[in-house]
Image (cartoon, grey):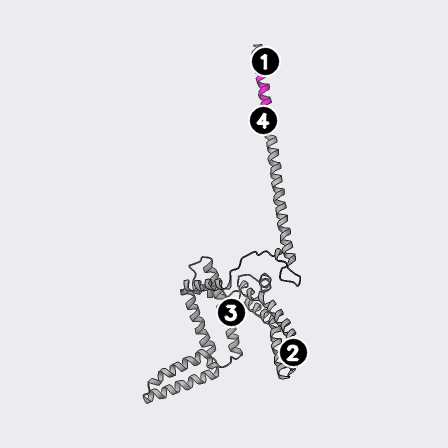
Amino acid sequence: MKKSKTKSVVSKSSSDEKNLVSKHVQRQAERQQKKLQKQEQKQKKQLAREKKQLVKKQDEVRLHRSFKRSYYEDYQRKTELPSLTSQANAVFKMFFKFWKIFLPLLLIFVGLYIFLIGAMSENTLADVRANVEQTNKDVADGKIGTVGKAGLTLLGIISTGGLTTMNDAQVVIAILLFTIIWLVTIYLARHLLAGHQEIKMRDGFYSALSPLVSTLVVGLIIFLEAIPIMLTVIVFQVALTTEFLSTPFYALLFFMFATLMITLSLYLLSSSFFAIIVVSAPGLYPLTAIRMA
């Protein structure tokens, strides 16, 4: 009995020792795992800090946006833009692929331009009236052949507006018409490129006009940025009428002035033209679009 008791005590003590050893090993393994996790978290934080520092350095350099020299080694393109020819080919391919959407849109634009701008002038209406009266006389006299000529003349007058300059109302209508068609085209192109094949042209007219005011504000900013070019043209016309450019020294001064003004205007306009496309996104303010562009 004593031997069996001693054996049971020894077995219990050995099992307890094994349990203690296994628990100790498990604790060490857990500690090592925690250390490894902490090291991984530290490495991730360091990588995130390094990325933030790189972004800050790139923002501080502001390549090609200041008068400081920018080196080629510091310049890193975030996106690779295709060339103009490839972009033009992509546009034509998309137009011919989805011609059932873009062709009616083009016809609507041409029709609205003809009837809202070409047929609004008083001279145009007078020419149309004269052609209609002459056609009625020819038909009454039996000259049916002149009806076709009168029809072609009438169509030419309406489509060209009589080749006269547009008045203020026609200019406003033309700007609004171009802006609406521009927004609808961008809306349709964005959804078609995103793979939404079920979109229709009417969806563009119903949903694309929300950034109309923002687009007009960006257009106003573009007009203000083009003022240096307008001033240069006005000064050039005045200099021609007053023979200011006859002397070489004054001509050199005007050339330097014109170069600076045109360069400044082109520098400002280079990003604002892209802002017209950026501002078409819903919920985007005009100044934010200009900063992004």
Q: Which mark is residue 22?
A: 4
Mark 3 packing: few (<14 Cα in 10 Å), some, or many (20+)? some
Identify which residue is drawn at 41% across, 79% down: 155
Q: Which mark is residue 179?
A: 3
Q: Which residues are magenta?
A: 6-19
Residue farthest left in this picture: 142
Three-letter residue code for mark 3: Thr
Picture coordinates of residue 165, whole percent (x, y)? 51, 80
Point out the frontmost of discs 2 and 1.
2
Residue 33, image quadrant: top right
**Where the C terminus falls, by quadrant?**
bottom right
Q: Are marks 1 and 4 in contact (CB under 8 Å)?
A: no
Residue 291, image quadrant: bottom right
Question: Which residue lies under the disc numbered 1?
Answer: 6
Mark 3 or mark 2: which comes first in sequence?
3
Mark 1 or mark 4: which comes first in sequence?
1
Question: Which residue lies under the disc numbered 2?
Answer: 251
Q: CA distance from mark 3 to mark 2?
A: 40 Å
Mark 1 or mark 3: which comes first in sequence?
1
Three-letter residue code for mark 4: Ser
Mark 2 or mark 4: which comes first in sequence?
4
Mark 4 or mark 3: which comes first in sequence?
4
Point out the frontmost of discs 3 and 2.
2
| Magenta span includes 12 | yes
Three-letter residue code for mark 2: Ala
Identify which residue is drawn at 59% across, 27% down: 23
Q: Nearer the viewer, residue 219 or 80?
A: 80
